[in-house]
Image (spheres, rainbow, N blue to C red):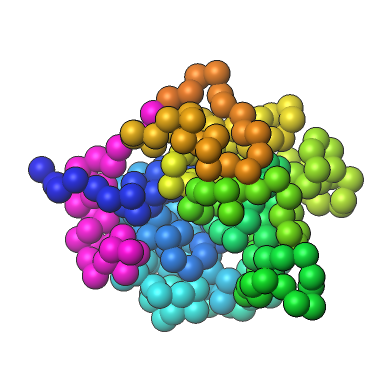
Amino acid sequence: MVDRYNLMELMVCVASRQLEDGKTAVIGTGMPLAAAMLAQKTRCPNLITMFEAGSIAPQLTKLPLSVADSFTMTNALMLSSMDEIMTACQRGVVDYTFLGGAQIDMYGNLNSTMVGSDLQKPKVRLPGSGGANDLASLCWKTLIITPHDKRRFVAKVDFLTTPGYLSGPGTREAAGLPPNTGPYKVISTLALMGYDAVTKRMQVESLHPGVTAEDIRNNTGFEILFADDLSVTSEPTDEELQILRTQVDPLGLIIGK
């Protein structure tokens, strides 16, 4: 039997389960890298990973430190450029992307630009979009990984860096973004969330073990929905934890945080 899991291990396992075998996914730095590797080594051996720096379909044998790490290029099918990756997204051939941000609202809009109301003198200056806006605008399904507290889950983002469902049903398409794209799942430190098909609002699908609905409400800055069939998130299996600890992240670069 493996040792008891920690919160980072739970989030990586939950994130990996959202991916599908045979699909394409643009993977970001950090936890998404560990999730993609775990998915490839368990449920999704034919998952096609892509990286913003240009690598397409590598074999993730060692955990890369960034999307431009040489380990994202091991036995890759193609070594191209950022232009090629973004063009693939624009063509509609990328199924998933993984993103994060400093703030997220009920419609899945993300802020990774600034905290505060003064653009010239923000309280906190953040890294900005990078490729996040392009990826969330063009990929079919956006997966978001983030800690869960009121500072991050806000009624309105201070700066709209990356579009979710904007202000509700139809507004994403009205802005010129491809139909049937948008936020898909949010994996937080408290729960797994999706989006209501009608209102496009964030909706809790499963509570992590030991978490209550009241915990979610107390740590969310907007009125969040709860699915009728609300469940408890499945704990990491022995196999998932063993592979995660011995093959994916043996140095604890992600799961040791």
Image quadrant occupied by the C terminus: bottom left
User: At x 24% / y 48%, what residue is drawn?
Assistant: 5
- 98 w.r.t. 105: above or below: below
Task: Estimate the x, y position of residue 206 in percent, counting from the top left.
Answer: 46, 31
- 237 w.r.t. 158: above or below: above
User: At x 42% / y 30%, what residue is drawn?
Assistant: 212
Q: In this view, does 243 lie to the left or right of 7?
A: left
- 80 w.r.t. 164: above or below: below
User: At x 87% / y 51%, what residue is drawn?
Assistant: 175
Q: How many marks?
A: 0
Along the viewing direction, whichever of 91 and 212 lies nearer the viewer? 212
**In the image, is residue 17 part of the stretch drawn in magenta?**
no
Q: Is residue 218 left or right of residue 154?
A: left
Along the viewing direction, whichever of 182 and 77 lies nearer the viewer? 182
- 76 w.r.t. 220: above or below: below
Along the viewing direction, whichever of 249 and 114 lies nearer the viewer? 114
Along the viewing direction, whichever of 222 and 227 lies nearer the viewer? 222
Q: In which quarter of the image is residue 8?
A: bottom left
**In the image, is residue 247 part of the stretch drawn in magenta?**
yes
Extreme residue toward the left, this view: 1
Find the magenta span and give its range.
Answer: 232-257
Task: Estimate the x, y position of residue 195 in percent, counting from the top left.
Answer: 63, 35
Task: Estimate the x, y position of residue 219 in percent, counting from the top left.
Answer: 53, 42
User: At x 20% / y 61%, what residue is drawn?
Assistant: 246
Q: Is there any visible trace of residue 21 in the rendered image?
A: no
Q: Is there any visible trace of residue 202 in the rendered image?
A: yes
Image quadrant occupied by the N terminus: top left
Task: Estimate the x, y position of residue 53 in percent, counting from the top left.
Answer: 56, 76
Q: In which quarter of the image is residue 64?
A: bottom left
